[in-house]
Image: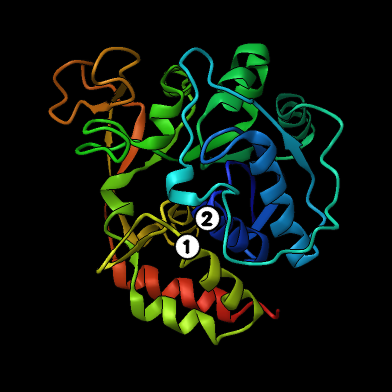
């Protein structure tokens, strides 16, 4: 049985890798891709999503979304992902056109027309999702859960407190965490563990055309160290397919929306402030070797 998902994304190198897995794994049914400003501007994230779809000749609709956060000023991550958001590989330029509707309209239509509840997989800022819930609250009853890359229980990667996706639009993140929909928080607590190792990266280059493409764009990722490269967004797809490799803890997550800690996700780890209630399953540990093994196996299985 396949998992029916919608990806709301801001490609971005690791988003492109996550899209690659979602498009090609037979257990995932990717119904729609919506784009948002994040790693780069929304015109670029939309084009990058289309490049991945065109690369694999996949007919999945794309709808462009929010150009800026709900309230705070937009700050991109071009310093990590390059000016285009996805450098290092020459993709085809004969790209399909995005839908003639907004991301919010496309999300609403796809969710409400589905014959079963949808899983939302946001891998960028949550602006489109927050606007959807604000304008069409009826969709909440038709969403299975949200598996969202973002947040951290410890150090951030945008500020000392905040992870990038939540920092980009903390007001949207607050709306999502207060939505009442089951949420899995796939944050830095595991994505900074499950690094794609240098050995894994070197194997990609000679695997197949997909491996070469991923090798070339991942090699341009500025979020790297001697231990490897963080594939943050890919962890959402890994969780969907292999939850047994990830440890989660149920807790309440609050989002800070102003001040020096803006964008911080505060987990009520002690259960001290919400009378034992929880609003998220937070990923706290991961089998990093299993992640690398799965990543390579996924690419090797792609007949392209």
**Foreground of the two, 73 or 177:** 73
Residue lying at 69% horizontally and 66% vertically, measured from the top left: 90
Q: Position of residue 276 (x, y in %)?
A: 22, 22
Residue lying at 41% horizontally and 52% vertically, measured from the top left: 232
Quadrant where the image shows the N terminus: bottom right
Helix, strand or loop at label 2? It is helix
Asked whether the residues under the numbered discs 1 and 2 touch, taking CB atoms below 8 Å apart as contact, a structural biologist would say yes
Q: Nearer the viewer, mark 1 or mark 2?
A: 1
Residue bearing the label numbered 1: 220
Q: Is residue 221 left or right of residue 253?
A: right
**Foreground of the two, 281 or 115:** 281
Q: Position of residue 58 (x, y in %)?
A: 79, 60
Q: Position of residue 207 (x, y in %)?
A: 56, 85
Q: Is residue 70 above or below residue 95?
A: above
Residue bearing the label numbered 2: 13
**Foreground of the two, 114 or 14:** 14
């Amino acid at each position: 049985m396949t998992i029916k998902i919608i990806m709301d994304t801001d490609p971005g190198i690791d988003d492109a890798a996550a899209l690659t897995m979602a498009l090609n794994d037979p257990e995932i049914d990717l119904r729609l891709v919506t784009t948002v400003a994040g790693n780069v501007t929304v015109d670029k994230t939309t084009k990058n999503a289309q490049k991945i779809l065109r690369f694999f000749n996949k007919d999945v609709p794309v709808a462009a979304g929010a150009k800026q956060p709900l309230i705070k000023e937009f700050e991109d991550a071009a310093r990590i992902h390059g000016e285009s958001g996805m450098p290092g590989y020459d993709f085809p330029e004969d790209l399909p056109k995005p839908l003639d509707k907004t991301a919010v309209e496309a999300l609403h239509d796809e969710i409400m027309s589905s014959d079963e509840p949808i899983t939302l997989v946001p891998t960028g800022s949550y602006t489109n999702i927050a606007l959807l819930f604000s304008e069409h609250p009826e969709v909440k009853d038709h969403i299975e859960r949200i598996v969202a890359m973002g947040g951290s229980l410890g150090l951030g990667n945008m500020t000392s407190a905040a992870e990038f996706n939540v920092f980009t639009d903390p007001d949207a993140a607050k709306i999502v965490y207060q939505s009442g929909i089951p949420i899995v928080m796939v944050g830095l607590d595991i994505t900074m563990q499950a690094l794609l190792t240098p050995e894994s990266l070197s194997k990609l280059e000679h695997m197949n055309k997909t491996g070469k493409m991923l090798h070339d764009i991942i090699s341009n990722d500025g979020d790297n160290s001697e231990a490897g490269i963080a594939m943050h967004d890919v962890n959402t797809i890994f969780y969907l397919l292999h939850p047994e490799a990830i440890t989660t803890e149920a807790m309440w997550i609050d989002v800070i929306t102003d001040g020096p800690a803006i964008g911080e996700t505060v987990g009520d780890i002690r259960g001290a402030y919400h009378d034992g209630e929880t609003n998220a399953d937070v990923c706290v540990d991961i089998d990093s070797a299993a992640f690398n093994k799965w990543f390579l196996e996924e690419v090797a299985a792609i007949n392209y």
